Amino acid sequence: MSKVAHYLQEHLVGEVMSGTDARLYFATDGSILQTAPALVAYPKNENDVRKAARFSWQLAERGRVIPVTPRGSGSNHSGAAIGSGIILVFPAHMNRILELDTKTGTVTVEPGINYGKLQQALHTHGRFLPPYPASLEYSTIGGAVSNNISGEKSIKYGSTRDYVKSLRIVLANGEVVETGRLSKRELSKKLGLATFEGEIYRSIDTLLEEQHELIEQLPRNVTMDSAGYCLTDIKRKDGSFDLTPLIVGSQGTLGIITEATLGTEPYNSQTTLIMASFDSLEHFQQAVLELRGLPEMPSAMEMVDGNLLQQVHELNPNQLKDIIAPPFPLVTLLVEFDSAERRIKKLIKKTQKILDKTAKDYQVTDEPEQELLFWKVRQATSSLLAHNAGLLHAVPLFDSAVPVDRLREYLEGLYSLMEANNLKPAVWGHAGDANLHVQPQLNLGQVGDRQKAFRLMGEHNKLVINLNGTISAESGDGRLRTPYLEFMYGSELYALLQKVKQIFDPYGTLNPGVKFGSSLDDIKAIVRTDYNLEHIYTHLPQS
């Protein structure tokens, strides 16, 4: 064990490891990248996190940088949960529900708690946390907050940022602060603090005042966006101030989350689900836009294309037997409503009018067993994600969303991109948010396929930016999309975001290389040549 590991083990209550096996295990996450940490620490409590951050800061003051990277279950696809320094692994110890107010539905948790287990606990009280990801059974709340995760219910309920009320975070120097909406008077007290926290409040407040016109250019016309930092909802017109929106989605680059207080929604298990098929992308987009214009938004609007269903059928002809059969439609759309019974009936009637003029055909059900069968069509994506043909694997390269009225153009662009690179297309995702997924089958052990992966990323990101979309929709920038962020934002906006990073992390000890500091050459050097899903095969891989 190294001297650094010995020192940390002496001062931390939790365990510290520097063995080869542990370092290799935490060298990968759900992305195509790989970086072995110097050591692994399992913090027992907030004080352990504080000590690790303070230690890293003190070393950096003397010119030696050993960065700190917080990690949940490592399911992130952007390479944000790996790092070359100290990996802080939260699920081992910091995994509790600390408080649940059953009247308001507000819940306070530690970052390492499993998302699925929290959801189960909330269900017993008639509540739920809506922006859950497809990976909820094997991901953590800390990861969801750090990445500003969105999911199938986000079309109606919003992203994770909409549910985080306050956070406890450890700053780069080891100070512990609690974020939350402050009044003018409370903000004045923060601005007067002679601490690093006070310095941050003063610097961010000044930045917001001096750069407000530039900041107004940050938001993009999309419903899902986790790129860069959120600066638009920190200071409101009434003078109130809250750093929480800034920390959510920052991927451990501004502070390390040790507690999160979240709002929840009433849970209604009685839903109605419609499965519709389309033979025209134009009609498909028209239906999506009109469904979004209903008096109440559907609680989910998910799609899979015919290419995906055909590939699943070829792998296992019985998987979707008696649910949907070849020849498969161009697009299959699942539309769910979870409103009160009276309201649902009216919404279904309006939906049927829309589908009568746009869809090839559709089925409606409110029977739970039949709904499960319909959802199997969307969940069939798991078969492609888990399948490997020899050394070929479905690799996660993209996480983008475009304006909903450009959904058809995005789909057409994806098909052209895949065809130009001699790859089989298969598209699925959150149709109502125009957040689509494609994971091309590549062998990253081959130089040619690694080159193709970067060519695909470059061409795809150019397509999305030309459609005024975001290259980071629901799982963050990480390392994988960092080289493209300046291209998306432009140099002036990117420099503004970089200034925020410098305010919070002057020595670069908090997850460096994420959002800033990773070039294309940097990430090409750390691509995994043996990409696989061994971390999550205990569960069914979902996307």
Image (spheres, rainbow, N blue to C red):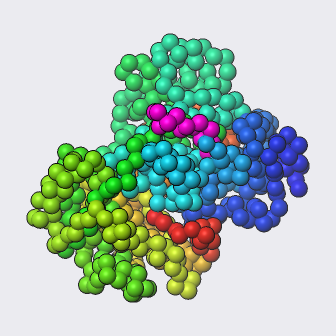
Residue 472 visible somewhere in the drawing: no
Name the residue nearer the viewer: 398 or 379: 379
Residue 408 vs 100, above or below: the answer is below
Q: Is residue 101 left or right of residue 19?
A: left
Q: Position of residue 392 (x, y in %)?
A: 53, 81
Q: Is residue 43 left or right of residue 259?
A: right
Q: Position of residue 175 (x, y in %)?
A: 69, 29
Residue 62 vs 405, above or below: the answer is above
Q: Position of residue 480 (x, y in %)?
A: 53, 58
Q: Quadrant of the N terminus?
A: bottom right
**Magenta stretch bounds:** 98-111
Residue 363, by quadrant, is: bottom left
- Residue 108 part of the magenta segment: yes
Residue 328 visible somewhere in the drawing: yes
What residue is at 63 percent from the left and 16 percent from the top?
Answer: 193
Residue 75, by quadrant, is: bottom right
Residue 265 vs 393, above or below: the answer is above
What residue is at 61 percent from the left and 33 percent from the top?
Answer: 168
